[in-house]
Image: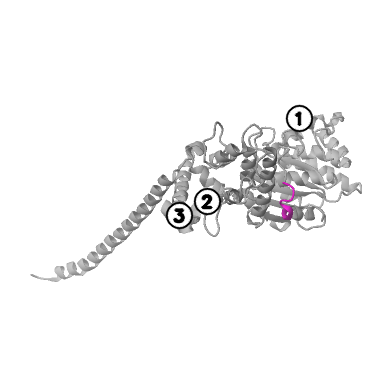
Amino acid sequence: MHPGVELLSSFPDIKTLKEFVSFRALYNSSAQDPTRRVHPGTRQRVLKRILDWIDTPSAKERIFWLHGPAGVGKSAIAQTIARSCAKGKVAATFFFYRSDPGRNDGNRLFTTLAWQFGSSIPATKNALIHSLNECPDIPMTDVETQFEELIVKPFKALKMSGVQPSAPVVIIDGVDECSDDNLQRRFLKVIGNAVKDDRVPLRFLICSRPEAHIQDTIDTFRSLTLPLDLAKLDDANQDIERYLRAEFSRIATEQDLDPAWPGEEIIQEFIYKACGQFIYASTVIKYTGDEYSSAQTQLDIIRGLKPPSSISPFAELDELYKEILRRQRDPDFLKDFLSLLIGRNGIELDLGLHKDDALLLNVSAKDLHRKLRGMHSLLKFEPFIDVHHRSFLDFLQDLSRSGQYYISKQAGTRRYLDFIVGSLVRYASTIIERHDECVSSVKIEISTPYRSLQSQNPF
């Protein structure tokens, strides 16, 4: 069994730490969704790569960075790994969640990990208690000091005593869900420096969206990092198909429907719309399989054939998209960019924005990428800018789902054409200005010698 909420409470010396522990962030806390695990038979390649790394304590990569767009199943993978590994392999966990104050505070990350080490690696406990007795206010210090006093020193004492654990793993999921971006950078830097230090035998499985500031920070210790981009794996659609078939079969059995329900065409429709996004597929199944409703009626609603009776079937997915959009720093530019994206998609299906399209927004390609730094979990940037998942476009074009971010296909197309006209006008104005400057220059060049001749003419 892994360290859980029943840790060290019997040791009076440790009580100063307890109030700074985020028990809700532990993998087995009551706050975790018990269904958020990998569906049997899916994500086998990803799980194998992570487990192989965990089972190789001598691997030079001390950090495994699992990253991917919003909704691709990173947390489900992290939960599955945490629950499947023995206590000696995974020593501590922390699952961030932005909307939960008990799980979104990066200042509680290292205090929570240290608390778990006291149980999973008991030999660190005395040194941890000693540090707290010497300085009871350590949990209130900055994350850099916390890590040194609560984690480095106990492991250093452990090494000096001749005990060396076999490179236990720490799982930190949802780094981007920490409420403070700057704090994300800081604790990642602390971890990056720690894995270079042989006093700290720990390894880290870090799961996050590919936000630019996280990528930049992890790049500073890339030689010690093994990255895995879920967006680039080619088996996601196969796994989603396997998941949908199994779950639709279960629902058909439970509701006494035709075993072939809902039919091949509809299954393929959902696979296409999911586009590798497990949260979309799981939303379809949760909504369709509601035990208090007709599965066929729920299916018609989620396909848009019937209006929902109350809450949108995609409420969870919609909130995920809104949360990311709310964090963007320039809402006016965001609206223009999304209009351009919708308009371009409406004219040329499945074709994203090329870097030259930045000119339509009157910015350079470099500035465009800078302004979109916070959108990496929704957009891919190579070979051109496009959405990771088509469900994001569906969200934007549905007023009942996107609210203030709503952009109809017609409005997007009009705005796209406006951008083109505006760009042509700016270009034409530049040409005219250059022409006027050239004409003025020629007039000056001609008039100068003419005036000189006039001054020499005696008549």
x and y percent of residue 428 in the render? Answer: 32, 58
Residue on which disc 1 sits: 19
Inspect the magenta stretch and tell me whether residue 447 lies in it. Answer: no
Inspect the magenta stretch and tell me whether residue 45 lies in it. Answer: yes
x and y percent of residue 150 in the render? Answer: 79, 40
User: Three-letter amino acid code at disc 3?
Assistant: Ala
Mark 2: secondary structure: helix
Quarter of the figure with the N terminus: top right
Mark 3: secondary structure: helix
Cα separation between marks 2 and 1: 40 Å
Q: Is residue 204 left or right of residue 294?
A: right
Cα separation between marks 3 and 1: 50 Å
Q: Residue furthest left?
A: 459
| Whether residue 31 is situated above or below residue 278 in the rendered picture | above
x and y percent of residue 164 in the render? Answer: 88, 49
**Discs 2, 3 touching: Cβ within 8 Å:** no
Please give the label number shown on residue 358.
3
Residue on which disc 2 sits: 370
